[in-house]
Image: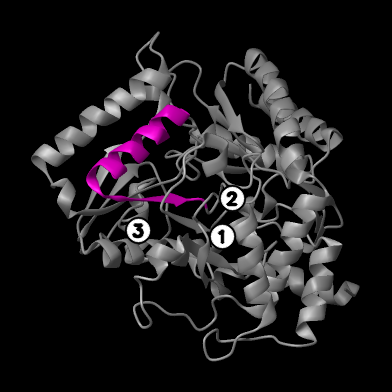
Amino acid sequence: MTMKHTQDWMEMTNSIGNLLAPSMAKDHPNLPVVKAEGCYYYGADGRTYLDFTSGIAVENVGHRHPKVVQAIKDGADHLIHGPSGVIIYESILKLAYELQQIMPEKLDNFFFANSGTEAIEGGIKLAKYVTKRPYVVSFTGCFHGRSMGALSVSTSKSKYRKHMQPSWLTYQLPYAHPDDLPEGANPAEFFPEKLERDIEKLFNHQVTPEEVACIILEPVLGEGGYIIPPKEWLAKVREICDRHGILLIFDEVQTGFGRTGNWFAAQTFGVTPDIMAVAKGIAAGLPLSATVASKELMDQWPLGTHGTTFGGNPLACSAALASIEVLKEEQLLENAQKLGAYALEELDKLKQKHPVIREVRGVGLMIGIEVMDPETKRPDGEAVMKVLDDCLKQGVLFYLCGNSGEVIRMIPPLVVTQEQIDEGIQVLDQALTNLR
């Protein structure tokens, strides 16, 4: 990129509000970058930034991994677009086969789309069509997307639904949130028992179980604050679904492809859903997602009940194949387990040092640092923004989540090294010190 080109481009970023809708242009921090590689962004300002966002849990194999780049280049020599069904091509079939090898048992049939939201829409449509039941139950705090169907089950923030309340009815139950845990109680016992009581109230007062097509949830809350439920609670959800003939949908858009230290959170927690939605880390940055179920379920969803023009794009499928290969060859699931545990240990030391940290929680390399006002003990989203800005000045990019933006997300690419973890935590430590 020439100096003049860079100057022209930087001037254009000053007009971002005149070019992009506020809902796209007002996010944080709109860092102008010219290149990305591995765990780094290269800024238009000439600086290098350590990326602890992974493009929001997308770049699990790192930015522009050479094998992924080569797969895209090779694929472009043959096919760029392939409306699946009108034509069929090798990469989509090979990807389906490879996914069968890593999915939980019986999740072996795929409908490919372009985004996590589309995968969720597909899962809900499949559940309603197969069961012939009208209603869906979700959990407070979960985020499933912003299209109207996905929005009907998303409750991480009320502002996402403002003036856009879905026209069809859904029901919500409390998630297994640590704030609801009585002092001294065992979460593995308390939350399953509470869920049993909550579901009984729902079925007694609002909707009968025979009317519920599916229960949908994130096995780990993402946008809602990186809340990690006990595996016993997820097992109880599975049991309730089985008891009433309700299908269970896992939204693994953010947790999939090694983020929790296993291929999928379903394997991390030992609970298998009937339907799974996957996206983000599947194709190393190219738009791709999938609604996944058993062949038995998918066979009840005939031609015409769902469709796509761009879903399962040939280049995206090639990138996904390369990404799966890299995850295996470079033992990135194991790296997520090892360095995730290491990061939690180091972050716990920060918690002891900085009263502003209320809690550190994580599984694999999906880690949340919750920030509070030390005096009021209330969530402090303003403090989080100050910390994020300070970290960016020091060359490390973090992101936020939680209902009040009170949680710092730490989700580096799974190729991250211990030295990079140390660097990121050191910068975070300094930012928290400056905040105090």
Residue at horizontal 10 percent and vertical 38 percent from the top: 204
Is the C terminus in the top left, top right, bottom left or bottom right quadrant?
top right
Residue type beneath disc 3:
Leu
Q: Quadrant of residue 41?
A: bottom right
Read off the residue under disc 1.
279
Mark 3 burial class by Cα count in 10 Å: few <14, some 14-19, many 20+: many
Q: Which mark is residue 413?
A: none
Q: Earlier in the sequence, mark 2 or mark 1?
A: 2
Residue type beneath disc 2:
Gly
Q: Position of residue 247 (x, y in %)?
A: 32, 52
Q: Which mark is residue 256?
A: 2
Residue 173 on the magenta span: no
Q: Earlier in the sequence, mark 3 or mark 1?
A: 3
Q: Are marks 2 and 1 in contact (CB under 8 Å)?
A: yes
Q: Mark 3 falls on what kind of element?
A: helix
Q: Quadrant of residue 398?
A: top right
Residue type beneath disc 1:
Ala
Mark 1 burial class by Cα count in 10 Å: few <14, some 14-19, many 20+: many
Read off the residue under disc 3.
151
Q: Position of residue 308 (x, y in %)?
A: 47, 80
Can I make out residue 123 in this image? yes
Residue at horizontal 37 percent and vertical 55 percent from the top: 160
Q: Mark 1 falls on what kind of element?
A: loop
Q: Position of residue 370 (x, y in %)?
A: 54, 29
Q: CA distance from mark 2 to mark 1?
A: 8 Å
Residue at horizontal 51 percent and vertical 67 percent from the top: 110
Question: Which one is in front, 43 or 343?
Answer: 343
Q: CA distance from mark 3 to mark 2?
A: 21 Å
Q: Which residues are magenta?
A: 230-252
Q: Position of residue 25 (x, y in %)?
A: 55, 63
Q: Are marks 3 and 2 in contact (CB under 8 Å)?
A: no
